Amino acid sequence: MDFMAEMAELALASRLRRLSDLYWQGVTATYRQSGLDFDVRWATVFVLIARQGPVAVMEIADRLGITHPAVIQVINELEKHGLVVSAKSEQDGRKRLLSLSQAGQAMLPKLQPLWDAFIAVNKSMIGNQTHNLLVSLQEMEAQLAERNFYDRILDQLTAANSPDKLAMDQLSIISYSPAYQPDFKRLNIEWIETYFRVEPHDLEQLDHPETYVLPNDGQIFLAKAGEEVMGCVAMVNMGESGFELAKMAVSPKAHGKGIGKKLCLAALDYARQLGVKTVWLESNRRLTPALTLYASIGFREVVSIPTPYARADIRMEIGL
């Protein structure tokens, strides 16, 4: 028997690396057989530039969830091979915008049939699996985006008998009552001020949820660990466009414990019980852990529409 398989969870990282190596070998051989001087490591950056360029290095790093230096390394190699070009942004001279060169544009139609084949083969193999690998990866990435593996290990080593762990064992999802308005506001102000600034519409909903959130079957769900409120999420009836999932916040000390996902699932179950067909949300592309969580649940990006929030630059929907 495969010894890595015998080690199960202990060898998870090694098995993922081994699987990655098998893919990379096959893809590299395909490129070479097709006579294309293209490295498998370039693909995701190259595709993003092709679809969304001109695009800045920082945006590439944010969209792919990889480090800025890693993107720079790939960009340098693509430039060396003449596949991308860069130009200064007219709005910000410090920003370098990347797009495909003429050689890159010429290579794109040669690569596309190979990529189509990769997609078809992967779909076929995934279709033969009991558990969809892409869904499982999305769920695992969502958990690690919420709290990294190292911090989770420390939690496991140090918190076996701590009061905090006992409190988390008692986690419950409850519905809103006026007594929880201060917690609803506290949790949201905390995260908003960490990344952005509090806007007037935030204060309307946070100070007066009975007026701006709860009418017409709107609801707020809260996560309680013991006697402490650790997270919250709102469902707001927006009429014909469906319900908005809004004001999702989890206390920093409770990150990585799956509270955000539990809150979202409770909110979606509530919407299903009401017969709601569409739930949507607005967020910001900087919030990678949140976006990964939403995607793992089934939300998909759609075209944005005018919004009262300056920070909102992405809209996502899920059909129920």
Image (spheres, rainbow, N blue to C red):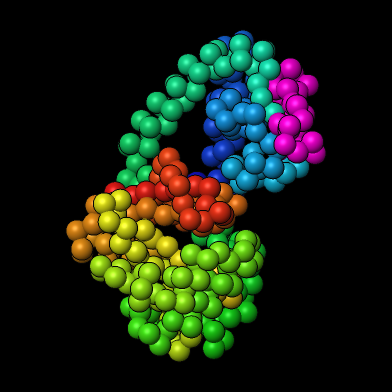
Question: Is 276 in front, or is 204?
Answer: 204
- In which quarter of the view is residue 263 placed? bottom left
Where residue 215 sits in the image (x, y, percent)? Answer: 29, 70
Residue 29 picture location, percent across and down: 59, 20
Q: Is residue 300 above or below residue 151?
A: above
In magenta segment, residue 76: yes
Q: Quadrant of residue 16?
A: top right
**In this orientation, which residue lies closer to the viewer: 85 or 282?**
282
Give the residues in magenta.
Answer: 71-97
| The magenta stretch spans residue 82 | yes
Q: Is residue 221 visible?
A: no
Give the residue drawn at x 32%, y 37%.
128
Residue at 43% across, 28% down: 119
Report whether 291 appears left or right of 175.
Answer: right
Question: Is 273 situated left or right of 95 in this image?
Answer: left
Residue 67 in sight in this render: yes
Quadrant in which residue 62 is drawn:
top right
Location of residue 235 in the rendering, given as x and y in whole percent from the top left corner = 35, 65
Identity of the residue drawn at 64% across and 39% down: 60
Q: Quick check: 149 left or right of 176?
A: right
